[in-house]
Amino acid sequence: MLLKIERLLIFCLLCGFAPSLSAANLYLTEVAPFAFVKESKEGKGAYDGINVRIANELRKRSGVPLQLLIVPSARHVVMFPADKEAYSISQAENFSEQEGLILSEVTQFPILVVAQRGAVMKNYDDLITLSADRGIGMMRRLSYGTFGQDERVRKVEINTLENGMRMLEAGRISGIVGSQPAILAAAERNSSSHLLGPSLVISYGSHVMRVRPEFAASAHSKILSSTLLAMKNDGSIARILDDFLKDPRTGLLPAK
């Protein structure tokens, strides 16, 4: 009787009745130019962006099933730590090691402070002086290296870079800090690129791929880590970046 049951189970597996391998969630923050809705000619929006394309290439080359979940930053920082078997591509300082272990660096961009056109900001002392007026807009939860702890720089919390750009245009803040591609994309979306004046690079920030600690030693995590390294070494990630950065009108610079 037991032998018949075993044969039946084998038959079911061969006939395709085995449950399909479920995909692990990969969280991306919805912020241009990394992940954003791109309108098509038909009017239907589809997600595109640097991290979306990297994630799609990673899924294809690794063979690891990944389900992209593209959410606002406030939801990303809550949903990823609550999801046991999950990954995240986001700014390195978004999460602690207890929330997610880093598998690999994905890209790196300059972090800069941008002031209104006509402002004087040639060095860090000028930045301190500029901030004393109305403050520098800074995204919550992000410290940008030692910048966040520098009490000489007056800071104002902003929810999104787009909101920060509106505050800068209205004269409510003296400058705004963020990664170079994200600031320029926010200015483009707000039609306020003409507003941007002098900028100062204060550090470099990385987008990294993290995994929930409970899943860090899995075979899939190791495959994803090695595949990302191969993509970086063979120039695949650089080519994806070039698709977004090659247009000189954007003012964006390639990642380091």
Image (tube, grey):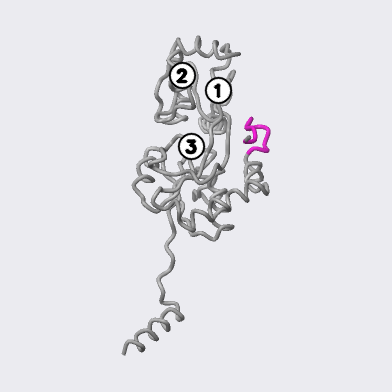
> Mark 2: which secondary structure?
strand
* Residue highlighted by disc 1: 202
Residue range of the region highlighted in magenta in the rendering: 245-255
Label 3: how many Cα within 10 Å (few below 14, some 14–19, many 20+):
some
User: Of circles 2 and 3, which is in front?
Assistant: 3
Q: Does the magenta stretch mainly form a helix, a strand or a loop?
A: loop
First along the sequence among labels 1 and 2 = 2
Q: Does the magenta stretch include residue 250?
A: yes
Residue type for callout 1: Ile
> Mark 1: which secondary structure?
strand
User: Where the C terminus falls, by quadrant?
Assistant: top right
Label 1: how many Cα within 10 Å (few below 14, some 14–19, many 20+):
some
- Disc 2 from disc 3: Cα separation: 21 Å
Label number found at residue 92: 3
Question: Is 31 above or below relative to 177?
Answer: below
Question: Is 144 above or below relative to 3?
Answer: above
The percent position of residue 76, horizontal first and vertical second, equals: 40, 42
Question: Is 57 above or below relative to 158?
Answer: below
First along the sequence among labels 2 and 3 = 3
Label number found at residue 136: 2
Label 2: how many Cα within 10 Å (few below 14, some 14–19, many 20+):
many
The percent position of residue 156, horizontal first and vertical second, equals: 40, 20
Q: Nearer the viewer, residue 135 or 171?
A: 135
Residue type for callout 3: Ala
Please give the name of the residue rendered at 41% of the width and 48% of the height, measured from the top-left corner. 212
